Image (cartoon, rainbow, N blue to C red):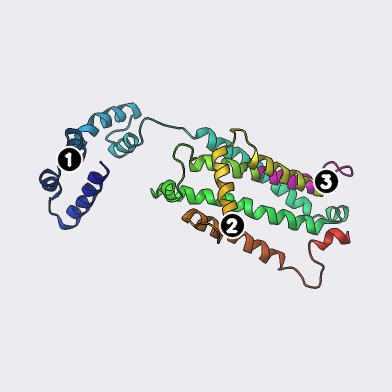
C-alpha cells in the first residue's frame, strides 16, 4: 500500500505538470493488484469510498460540500481527541499571569521596595534569568502550531512515539503552568508577602522547587512520557561527542543556545562601575 501510494502521488504530480493522463494506465499495466489495493490506488475507486462518508459528514456538521474537511477527518481515523479543555486551561493560566507580572513590575521599581529589599538588584536579575527560558518554552509552542498548520510531520522528524505524543495545544499547558507560577512568585517577592519572616528571595527558591517537582514527578500526570522524553534528550546534550547526534538533539541544542546567549548578554550589559549582580547578595 505504501509503495502504491508513493507511485500514485508521483504520477499525480507528473499528470499535473505534463497534462498527460498516465496514472490509470500505469497502475493497470505494471502493477499486480489485489481487489482492495486496486480500489485504493484507483482514484475513481477512492472517490467511491469517499463519497458516502463525505455526504454523511456534511449532513452531520451542517456544512455543504465540505469534501476537504471530510477527507481529512476520514484519514485521521476513528480516534478523535478534543483539546478544548487544554486550550482553556492554558488561556486561564496565561491570563492570570499578566496582572501578577504587571503588579510585580510596578512594585519592583518603587523606591520603598528598593530600600526594603537589600538584594533588590540581584533578585530582579535572577528573575530575569529564569524568565527567559520559560518564555522560550512558550514560543516553542508557536513552532509546533506553524508546523501543524503547514502539515509538517514533526512527529516523524523528531521520532516521537505516536501513542504518547502530545498535541501542540496540550504542549502549552506545562509552560503556562510554569509562567503563571513564576509571575505570582515574582509578585510575592516584590510585594514582600510574608516579610519579615519570609525573605523575598525564598519565593524564587519555592518556584525552582515547584519546577523540579513538576518536571520530575513520576506519576502519570502532566504528560509524563513527554516530560521524560525531554529530560532524556537534554541529558544527551550533556554527553555530546560520545553519542550519535540526531536531528532532535541538534534542534534542542540550537534552541537552548539562544536563551543561554541572551542570559550571558543580559548579565554582562551592566555598568562596569558597579558591582556584579551576584555580589549584591554579599554586599547587602
Q: Residue at x 50, y 34 (%)?
A: 84
Mark 2 lies on a secondary structure that is loop
Residue tagged by mark 3? 192
Q: Which residues are magenta?
A: 179-198
Instruction: Find out whether residue 189 is within the magenta segment.
Output: yes
In this orientation, does residue 172 appear?
no
Any mark on residue 197, and which? Answer: none
Closer to us: 40 or 133: 40
Instruction: Find out whether residue 58 is within the magenta segment.
Output: no
Which numbered disc flags the more N-terminal residue, 2 or 3? Answer: 3
The correct choice, above or below, for 268 with respect to 35 in the image is: below
In the rendered image, the residue lying farthest to the front is 242
> Which class describes the residues within 10 Å of circle 3: few (<14), some (14-19), or many (20+)?
many
Residue tagged by mark 2? 239
Q: Quadrant of residue 48?
A: top left
Q: Position of residue 113 (x, y in %)?
A: 83, 53
Q: Residue at x 68, y 44 (%)?
A: 212
Residue tagged by mark 1? 42
Amino acid at each position: 500500500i505504501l509503495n502504491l501510494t508513493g507511485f500514485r502521488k508521483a504520477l499525480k504530480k507528473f499528470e499535473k505538470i505534463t497534462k498527460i493522463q498516465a496514472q490509470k494506465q500505469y497502475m493497470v499495466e505494471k502493477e499486480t493488484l489485489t481487489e482492495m489495493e486496486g480500489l485504493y490506488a484507483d482514484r475513481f475507486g477512492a472517490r467511491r469510498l469517499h463519497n458516502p462518508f463525505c455526504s454523511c459528514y456534511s449532513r452531520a456538521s451542517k456544512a455543504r460540500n465540505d469534501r476537504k474537511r471530510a477527507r481529512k477527518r476520514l484519514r485521521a481515523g476513528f480516534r478523535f481527541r478534543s483539546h478544548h479543555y487544554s486550550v482553556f486551561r492554558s488561556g486561564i493560566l496565561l491570563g492570570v499571569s499578566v496582572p501578577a507580572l504587571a503588579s510585580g513590575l510596578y512594585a519592583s521599581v518603587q523606591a520603598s521596595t528598593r530600600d526594603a529589599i537589600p538584594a533588590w538588584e540581584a533578585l530582579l536579575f535572577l528573575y530575569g534569568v529564569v524568565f527567559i527560558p520559560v518564555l522560550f518554552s512558550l514560543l516553542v509552542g508557536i513552532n509546533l502550531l506553524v508546523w501543524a498548520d503547514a502539515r509538517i510531520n514533526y512527529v516523524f522528524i523528531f521520532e516521537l512515539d505516536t501513542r504518547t505524543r502530545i498535541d501542540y495545544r496540550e504542549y502549552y499547558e506545562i509552560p503556562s503552568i510554569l509562567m503563571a507560577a513564576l509571575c505570582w512568585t515574582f509578585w510575592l517577592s516584590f510585594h514582600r508577602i510574608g516579610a519579615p519572616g519570609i525573605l523575598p528571595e525564598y519565593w524564587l527558591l519555592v518556584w525552582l522547587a515547584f519546577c523540579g517537582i513538576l518536571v520530575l514527578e513520576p506519576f502519570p500526570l502532566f504528560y509524563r512520557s513527554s516530560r521524560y522524553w525531554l529530560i532524556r534528550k537534554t541529558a544527551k546534550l550533556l554527553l555530546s561527542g560520545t553519542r550519535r547526534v540526531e536531528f532532535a538533539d541538534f534542534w534542542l541544542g540550537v534552541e537552548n543556545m539562544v536563551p543561554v546567549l541572551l542570559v550571558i548578554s543580559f548579565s554582562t550589559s551592566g555598568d562596569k562601575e558597579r558591582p556584579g549582580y551576584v555580589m549584591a547578595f554579599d554586599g547587602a
